[in-house]
Amino acid sequence: MGVIRITVNSFLFAIKLTLGLLNNSVSVIADGFNNLGDCASSLVTTIDFHLSGKTTDEKHPHGYGRMEYISGFVVAMLIIVTAISVGKSSIVRILHPEQPTLTAWLFFAQVSHI
């Protein structure tokens, strides 16, 4: 299931990033990076499930059950970095506005996940 989420979100990221760059739309680019964040979260969660299910060994006598804390921290950091990056781009666009163009592809990208 995690592989499907990673694949779909990667595909959506690529489409939305391309359309956002072609049409000068920060909101579509931000939505694409949201999909990238979902992809990264799915990847981290998939790895977490794999690692936390391991049995105890010499290095980890209490097991790997606490991996969810590390994966949660990694996902939180990814979200924070994405938010700062999109916020910076938004401020730059507010200070130096550019006219976005609305195309059928851009419209489809925005309503495809409703």
Image: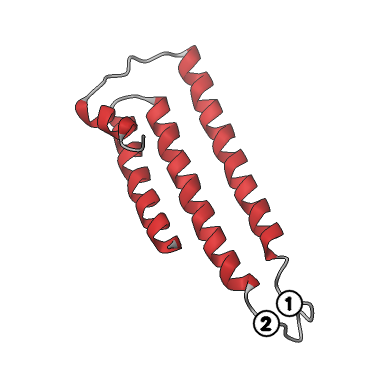
Residue at image x 58%, y 67%?
A: 49
Q: Quadrant of the N terminus?
A: bottom left
Density class for disc 1 (Cα within 10 Å; few <14, some 14-19, many ≥20) is some
Labels 2 & 1 near each other (Cβ < 8 A): yes
Quarter of the rendering containing residue 15: top left
Density class for disc 2 (Cα within 10 Å; few <14, some 14-19, many ≥20) is few
**What residue is pinned by disc 2?**
55
Quarter of the rendering containing residue 51: bottom right
Residue at image x 32%, y 18%?
A: 100
Q: Residue furthest bottom?
A: 58
**What residue is pinned by disc 1?**
63
Q: On the picture, is 27 further left or further right than 63?
A: left
Q: Quadrant of the C terminus?
A: top left
Residue at image x 50%, y 13%?
A: 95
Mark 1, secondary structure of its residue: loop
Q: Where 108 sits versus 6, above or below?
A: above
- Which three-letter amino acid code belongs to the residue tagged 2? Thr
Q: Position of residue 96 (x, y in %)?
A: 45, 14
Q: Position of residue 11 (x, y in %)?
A: 33, 49
Q: Where 86 sits versus 81, above or below?
A: above
For marks 2 and 1, the one nearer the N-term is 2
Q: On the picture, is 91 further left or further right than 21?
A: right
- Which three-letter amino acid code belongs to the residue tagged 1? Gly
Quarter of the rendering containing residue 64: bottom right
Q: Position of residue 92 (x, y in %)?
A: 50, 20
Q: Where 97 sits versus 58, above or below?
A: above
